[in-house]
Image (tube, rainbow, N blue to C red):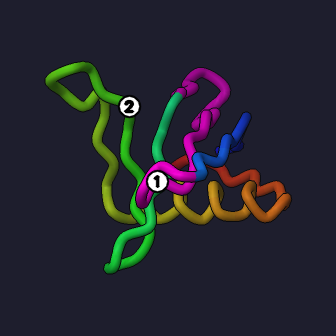
Amino acid sequence: MQILEIRTEPGSGNTIARFDVQLTPDIRMFGLKLVKTPRGHRVYPPHTSTNNVATFAPIFAEKLIRAALAALAGETVNERAE
């Protein structure tokens, strides 16, 4: 997986950033939201007005969180999606 772009969102409450990710050579997702909560960081998929467009298993969500936090720190993380 590779973070394509990450945009900080200052003044957006608990939202730290929004980001785009290439999960595999064939799959990209845009507009994921990185949030800091009292229980740690969370990542949320984009959504329509009524539904999420994806869900993530907890282990995969942790990989997304680590990659997004690394991108915010200016690091590059390329990890193969499993």
Magenta span: 11-30
Please give the name of the residue rendered at 14% of the width and 23% of the height, measured from the top-left corner: 50
| Residue 41: quarter of image | bottom left
Q: Position of residue 18 (x, y in %)?
A: 56, 41
Residue named by callout 1? 15
Report x, y in % for residue 11: 53, 52
Amino acid at the residue labelled 2: Pro
Q: Residue furthest front?
A: 11
Q: Is residue 33 visible?
A: yes
Whether residue 61 is visible to the viewer of this picture, yes or no, is no
- Gap between marks 1 and 2 measured at Cα: 13 Å
* Crowding at mark 2 (Cα within 10 Å: few <14, some 14-19, many 20+): some
Q: Is residue 62 above or below residue 49?
A: below
The percent coordinates of residue 71 (x first, y second) are: 74, 55
Amino acid type of the residue that numbered disc 1 sits on in the rendered structure: Thr
Q: Residue at x 26, y 20 (%)?
A: 48
Q: Who comes first in sequence, dot 1 or dot 2?
A: 1
Q: Which residue is mark 2?
A: 46
Please indicate whether residue 75 sits to the left or right of residue 30 in the image: right
Q: Is residue 16 magenta?
A: yes
Circle 1 SS class:
strand
